[in-house]
Amino acid sequence: MKKIAVMTSGGDAPGMNAAIRAVVRSGIHFGFEVYGIQYGYKGLCEGDIIRLERHDVSRIINRGGTVLGSARYDDFKKKSVRKIAVKNLLDLGIDSLVVIGGDGTYRGAQALSEMGIKCIGLPGTIDNDISSTDYTIGFYTALQTIVESIDRLKDTSLSHQRCSVVEVMGRNCGDLALYAGIAGGSEFIVTPETGFDKSLFLQQLKTSHETGRRHAIVVVTENIVKPHELAQEIEEVSGYETIATVLGHVQRGGNPVAFDRVLATEMGEYAVELINKGISSKAVGLKGMDLVDYDIVFALNKKREIPNKRYGLVGRLK
Ligand code: F6P
């Protein structure tokens, strides 16, 4: 009987469980024996591999995080370490692996493919920073969490005529800030894609205050500014009393929204279909309404398209 495995790696994302469930149940549907690798590449090297049956993935489609656990594991860049991983898989007779994660996870899968393990990558990260898919599993759930927080901040900012600086995750990708800015009706967004001209930004906020706007919401991608310091500068220059809020890991948790569950389920099944056809080294993505698959190397090198029109929208509507 063919044996396949599934694992989650890198930062967890809501919807990963739905993907695991789909891989396990589709695998069983095709007559495969399915295994789960716990705690990503680290667990793979430590032999942390368990058999998964249909009932093991019951009642997880609605749960955030990942029941398999996840890890960031830099040692996997070493070939000597990867050899241990390959041995652990082959000792159990597993030759195919579905990995769910971000770019780092894909790089690990590519390296394993070169060593003879058939890998399929599914995009699981809240950041939406994988260029081979329109949307990643987890993005819309994190976005929903952020927008709900912005709505709350807006209530209190308006009541006190304040400015709110909200820092969101995204690493090097501004999509969470961009979409949250649009959905939350924010006045300003600062992302890796917009860059940050501090004096122009402060001037705009000053003008906003002078022209009688009662409050302002500024959504910022992490790692660009120090939110509390920026809040102080806004207060000094613009006249708005300003509060900074760093949303942090709250954005990663919570039950996946329906979109993420459907996307993850469809992608999970698609991955198993590829394995069943003997296809490997692929990254699954969503393009428009359709699922597609790209060579993993191509997917890793593909340039991200910047949604310029969407960026313009925030400025035009403020
Ligand atoms: O990649 C997902 C993500 O949540 C990023 O947005 C963030 O920069 C990073 O992971 C945080 O990683 P960790 O949970 O390891 O601190």
Image (spheres, grey):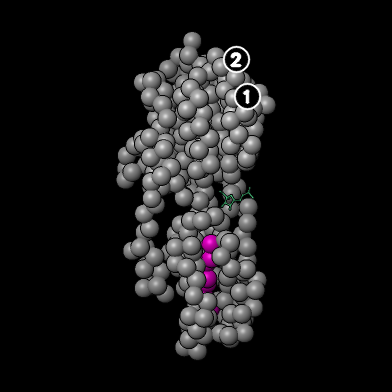
Q: Is residue 216 magenta?
A: yes
**Residue nearest the observer in this picture, 295 or 54:** 295
Q: Secondary structure at mark 2?
A: helix
Q: Is residue 138 magenta?
A: no
**Residue nearest the observer in this picture, 133 or 313:** 133
Instruction: Give the quadrant of residue 288.
Output: top left
Q: Is residue 130 visible?
A: yes
Residue sitting at the far bottom: 210
Residue 101 higher or lower than 197, as above or below: above
What's the distance in space between the residues labelled 1 and 2, CA to CA? 10 Å
Look at discs 1 and 2 and give the one toward the viewer: 1
User: Which label's residue is closer to the chain start, 1 or 2?
Assistant: 1
Write the start and end of the magenta stretch as one range.
215-221
Quarter that holds the C terminus: bottom left
Query: Tag on residue 91?
Result: 2
Query: Tag on residue 84?
Result: 1
Q: Is residue 22 visible?
A: no
Within 10 Å of disc 1 (Cα), the crowding (few <14, some 14-19, many 20+) is: some
**Residue type at the position of mark 1:** Ile
Identify the residue at image location x=33%, y=43%: 287
